[in-house]
Structures are given as structure tokens and as C-alpha cells.
Image (cartoon, coloured by chain):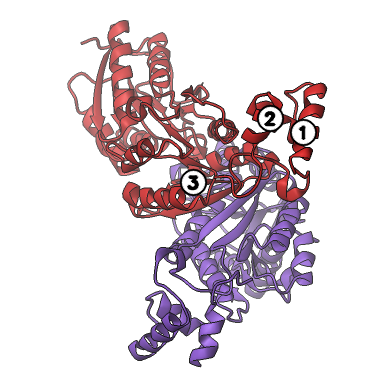
Chain colours: A purple, B red
């Protein structure tokens, strides 16, 4: 893809140091000795490299951009874009020091439409590397990038479906277990979960981890699946509360369903957390503004984006990049969870 | 900026129709008669135009991209990016049908750092047009684009500071008056406002409109200014409630400060809305999850972004674009506002 410029690979070959070391040296970054930096700079200059803004960084590629296609949901709800924005902010923080831009497209056409844009980018060389988010079961982008191993691409997804493709994989399994262990510590033995749609890969990952951890700890868990909407949280919470063996805690897969579940419980005169503890995934402003405030799993999405950016730069520099885990989730304890005060109902 | 390709202007000149008509004809869009379309297509082909994906649209520019620099707040709070994301989603919806990408940079360096990136883009021609958000008093980007009238740029800002530059201007004045009239209709005569920092242009616009509308309606309004944080909302609400003439309603400039004010009032045993009505700007999920739910001004940010995209495409097509108002705000009435039940305290 070198369009008439010398590349990091050229300088690396001529100097006998790694591509990363050349990149660090020319970009004034830590990671190489001053001796190596001086050697690389001297050699690069002799090969025609100039430290001006138009050639501040050398690499195999030259568009100085990362391509990202986001899938916009047709439903225009609050907060739908917050994960994407925080992720882009982290990505930007990683690549900005090397003067990289993000080339952004958004499509309402789902994974198929997103796939066509990535296909165009691969064909045209419009971007140096690709970041792929929101992968679904049977997503055509998996096949596309398997057919084009030369295209630099990083998936933020689950390793279960991206095998063979560099992946920054989620901590859903670990997060689900953390919540179960926390509730166990508070004395809960009979819990329920208001989970997301079953077709999402991360729903399956959470289902499996929750069931496994509950089984290890001798806890009972009832799970119902539904959409990420407040009304769904209300409806499923009411269904759970109508059960014969009423659980003492409910885990909700999003902040929105947790707020719905909370309102449903309070409307029935059930005290939170005295009679029922509620935990939300996706910590947000909505968790803080609820009364009582909601205990929630906090995902550091900016740190996730930052790590993605660093992995993409390594790829651009010609390094081999394997799978990496996303930064761990953090459980933020607030007012919606407490110890079991009624006698725990064990199945 | 034509880089060796024929331009819309060339075809317009040769065919004797407007640039917009040429654009519509070549892009297969409505807006020209079939006769004109046939004439333009024939002429454009004779001039060397080919209807392939690389030249689907002709224009004076050729990067097929819109440049946007976002300023990332150093404070990494919830929701700081939501406005930006919704705006980009609307922009994308407008420009996607013409195969335009958004070239995105984010900087933590404030307006000065953002200005340097726009300066680079103007110099390099990396983007066809520029969108500028988050303009401050004395913002260097105002001077930059005044010095470069040839650079196509649209400001989403207040007309008071962007005069001479194409602006999609806010409805802050109208929104502020709408809230005051709504509270007046409920019988409130003595109100307060928890406003944002005084250095923001939109704070001044709201201050002026609120004072003017209150004066017209014979209402009293006390305004305190502070940061957009929940703690600020709590602190200023407590200060207001300690006043001799306690107001019957408080208008907060953001959802965050409104949630803080609500918690402060409830903590003092003040009933909302029986003793105190609360209205928030920036309707959000946090307004819905609060108890009681918060009445709020809703801004259709996607529609704003969409309109910005349409204006930018007109500029790219060589049309003259003037100032336009953003889509009107909408007052969403929820449980935090009600009629005055105690005798209204008139100053």
C-alpha cells in the first residue's frame, strides 16, 4: 500500500531493528533506547524521510485513518449511541498522537450494509485499518475479513464467533460471575435475571456464566429474555414477582430494563432493597438518578476504545496482534442491593 | 479543489443549468425534469464523466468527506458524548446516500487544538466541508474560517457570535420562553433558575430570554450559575430553598443539575411537584428514571445533525447557504411539574 513513500518496513529492514522500534523512534515515543532512536533517525533521513507534519509517521499504510462503520438502530431511543461515542473517544485518544483520523460511516441497513462499506474500503485502500463492532451471529463481516487476511482488522466481540480474527473480547463471562458472587455474599440463594434477546452472542455468554456460577454456589436462578426496553423490564419483573418462589434479587442486562423492573417493584409496594435487590448491567446516569440508586456493572468503554486503538496501531506497524481481553468490569455498589432480610427461599 | 476531474461547476456552465440541478441529475435524485436530466447526463458523458462508483457524484470537491473535530471533555462523565453521537448520526443520515464519510478527530486540547486540525484540513484539502460544534466566546475557529471564506464550513452555534459565517443556530431563546410560559400557565409567579456557567454563549441567551419573558408576564425569577454537575444542582437548589421568598418552581439548565436539585428538595422533605415544580433542559434517560419523572425540554439532535448535513451538501454543490434555525424544542410534560397549590409568593 506504500504510495511512493518509504515505509516503516523499509527502514526496519535497512536498520535491522523491529518495525515497532522504527515507529517509536520516528514518532518520538518511549520504547526504544536513545542510541537506537538516533541510529534509526539518521538512517531514515538518509532514505529521504522528513520529520514534517505530512510525514510525521511512517508506516506501511498512508491514509492515516482507521475505518469504523456503526450500525444505527432505527428506534431513536436515549443513550443508544453512548457506547459507540465512548469507544470512539478512546480510539481517538490512542491514534490522535500519530495524527490518525477516524473515517466514520453509520448505516441503518444492519450488518449486510456495514459489510458492503468495509468491502469498498478493502478494495479502495481508503483506510489503513478497520475496527468492527456489534457483530451478530452469522455476521457477513466475519466471512469478509476471513477472505481478506491482508486487510488489517480488529473485532470488538466474543472470541466464540471470531476465531482466527484478531479480537478484543468481552468480559461478559467474568462480569456475570462477579454479580452472582456478590449476591451470594449478601445471602441471596434464589435469584432471577431479566436478560437480553437470545440471538445476541453476549446474552448467551452471560446465560452460561450465570447458570454455571449459580450451580457452583448452590443458588437457584430463573432467567427470562426480552428486548432492551423499560416496558420489557416492567413486564418481566411482574412475571417474576408472580412466581411461586419469589426471588430475593433480580439481575437486569441493561440500565433501561433495570429502571423498568425497579418501577414495577415499587408500584407493587415491594421495598428495594429490603424485599428485593436489583442489579443493572451498563452503569449510566439513569442508574444514578433512580431512587434508590442502582447497583450496576461499570464497563470502562473509553479504556476499551483506547486498547483497540493501540492494537490497531500495532497492526498498522506490521506487528502480529492476537486476541486480548477488554478491561475488567467493575461492580459499583449503590442503594438498590442489600442483605436478605426475609428468610431466603431456597428451591 | 478539483483534482484533475471535471466538476459540477464545469457541467453547469456548459449546460446552462444550476449546479444543484447538475448534482440531482448525475446522482439520480428528484429535483430536475427528465428532459434536463437526459441533457445533463449526455453533456457530462461527453465531457468525460463516468457513472462508476468512484465518480458517482461530481462536485467541486473530491474527497467525499465532511470533517468534524469534537472536543472531548477531560472529565469523563456519563452522557458527555451523547449530543455529539446523535448529531453525527443525523449528519451521517444526510450524507450517506451520496457516499460521504465523516472524518472524525477528537481532542482534549480545547478550541485551540481543534482549530489547528481545521487549519490542517483547509491547507491539505483533506475534507470537502467542515462542521464546527461547541464554539466558545473568543473561539479561534471563528477567526480561522473568516480568514478562509473559500473553505466550506457550517457552525452549529449562536448567531450572536458567528455573524458572517453560515450558522445552524440554536432555539435557546424560544425554549427558555416556552418553559416560562408553561410555568406561568400553572400559576407560578416566583421561580428560580439553576443555570450553566456564565461564559457559555447559550447560558447568556437563556438568561436574557428568561428575564425578558418573566418581565412580560409579571413573574419574578432568581438565577444562580454553576457547573453542569449533580452536586452543583444540589448545592444551588439548597441555596434557593434557603431564600426568604421561596420560589414554587425551579428551571435547571441540564438533566444532571435537575436530578441534583430533585434529590436536594426530597432530602429536605419538600414534595415535588406539590411544593416545588422542577423542569430540566436536555431531556434524557435520567429524566425518565427519576422519581418523580422530570418534565424536560427535548431537543431533536438527530434532526439537527440531519439538517446540518443537508446544508453542508448544498455548500459542496456550490449553493449559497445562509443561517438557519435548528428544529424547535419540545416540552415533554412529566410528573415533576404541577399547579401551584400553596399561595403564590409574589415579590
Question: x, y (%) of residue B66?
Answer: 55, 44
Asked whether, in this view, residue B307 is left or right of residue A214, the answer is: left
Mark 2 burial class by Cα count in 10 Å: few <14, some 14-19, many 20+: few
Please state which of the two labelled residues, at mark 2 or mark 3, is closer to the viewer.
Answer: 2
Chain on which label 3 sits: B
Q: Is residue B347 above or below residue B200?
A: above
Mark seen at residue B68: 3
Q: Is residue B262 above or below residue B159?
A: below
Q: Nearer the viewer, residue A220 or B103?
A: B103
View extreme (left): residue:
B244
Mark seen at residue B43: 1
Q: Which residue is mark 2?
A: B14
Q: Write the residue at 81% across / 33% down.
A: B42
Mark 1 burial class by Cα count in 10 Å: few <14, some 14-19, many 20+: some
Specify the quadrant of the image occupied by residue A289: top left
- What quarter of the picture does the C terminus of chain B occupy? top left
The answer to whether residue A243 is seen in the rendering is no
The residues bearing labels 2 and 3 have C-alpha atoms spaced at a distance of 34 Å
Q: Write the residue at 50% across / 54% down.
A: A86
Q: Earlier in the sequence, mark 2 or mark 1?
A: 2
Chain on which label 1 sits: B
Q: Nearer the viewer, residue A199 or B156?
A: B156
Please state which of the two labelled residues, at mark 3 or mark 1, is closer to the viewer.
Answer: 1
Q: Write the residue at 40% across / 49% down.
A: B119
Tell me, yes or no, whether the two marked residues, 2 and 1, touch with CB atoms within 8 Å.
Answer: yes
The residues bearing labels 2 and 1 have C-alpha atoms spaced at a distance of 8 Å
The answer to whether residue B139 is seen in the rendering is yes
Question: x, y (%) of residue A276?
Answer: 55, 50
The residues bearing labels 3 and 1 have C-alpha atoms spaced at a distance of 35 Å
Asked whether, in this view, residue B139 is left or right of residue B310, the answer is: left
Amino acid at each position: 500500500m506504500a504510495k511512493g513513500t518509504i515505509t516503516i518496513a523499509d527502514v526496519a529492514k535497512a536498520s535491522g531493528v523491529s518495525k515497532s522500534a522504527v515507529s517509536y523512534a520516528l514518532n518520538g515515543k518511549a520504547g526504544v533506547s536513545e542510541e537506537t532512536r538516533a541510529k534509526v533517525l539518521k538512517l531514515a533521513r538518509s532514505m529521504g524521510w522528513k520529520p514534517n507534519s505530512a510525514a510525521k509517521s511512517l508506516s506501511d499504510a498512508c491514509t492515516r485513518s482507521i475505518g469504523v462503520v456503526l450500525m444505527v438502530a432505527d428506534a431513536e431511543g436515549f443513550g443508544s449511541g453512548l457506547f459507540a461515542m465512548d469507544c470512539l473517544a478512546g480510539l481517538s485518544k490512542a491514534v490522535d498522537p500519530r495524527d490518525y483520523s477516524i473515517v466514520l460511516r453509520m448505516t441503518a441497513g444492519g450488518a449486510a450494509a456495514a459489510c458492503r462499506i468495509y468491502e469498498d474500503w478493502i478494495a479502495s485502500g481508503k483506510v489503513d485499518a478497520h475496527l468492527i463492532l456489534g457483530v451478530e451471529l452469522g455476521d457477513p463481516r466475519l466471512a469478509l475479513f476471513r477472505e481478506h487476511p491482508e486487510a488489517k482488522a480488529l473485532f470488538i466481540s466474543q472470541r466464540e464467533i471470531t476465531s482466527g480474527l484478531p479480537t478484543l473480547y468481552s468480559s461478559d463471562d467474568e462480569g456475570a460471575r462477579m454479580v452472582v458472587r456478590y449476591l451470594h455474599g449478601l445471602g441471596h440463594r434464589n435469584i432471577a435475571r431479566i436478560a437480553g434477546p437470545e440471538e445476541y452472542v453476549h446474552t448467551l455468554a452471560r446465560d452460561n456464566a450465570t447458570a454455571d456460577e449459580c450451580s457452583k454456589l448452590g443458588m437457584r436462578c430463573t432467567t427470562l429474555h426480552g428486548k432492551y426496553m423499560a416496558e420489557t423490564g416492567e413486564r418481566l419483573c411482574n412475571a417474576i414477582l408472580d412466581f411461586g418462589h419469589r426471588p430475593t434479587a433480580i439481575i437486569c442486562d441493561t440500565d433501561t430494563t433495570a429502571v423498568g423492573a425497579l418501577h414495577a417493584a415499587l408500584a407493587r409496594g415491594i421495598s428495594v432493597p429490603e424485599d428485593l435487590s436489583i442489579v443493572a448491567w451498563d452503569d449510566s446516569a439513569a442508574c444514578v438518578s433512580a431512587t434508590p440508586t442502582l447497583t450496576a456493572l461499570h464497563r470502562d468503554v473509553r479504556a476499551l476504545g483506547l486498547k483497540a486503538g493501540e492494537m490497531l496501531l500495532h497492526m498498522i506497524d506490521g506487528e502480529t496482534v492476537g486476541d486480548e481481553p477488554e478491561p475488567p468490569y467493575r461492580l459499583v455498589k449503590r442503594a438498590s442491593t442489600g442483605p436478605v432480610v426475609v428468610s431466603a427461599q431456597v428451591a
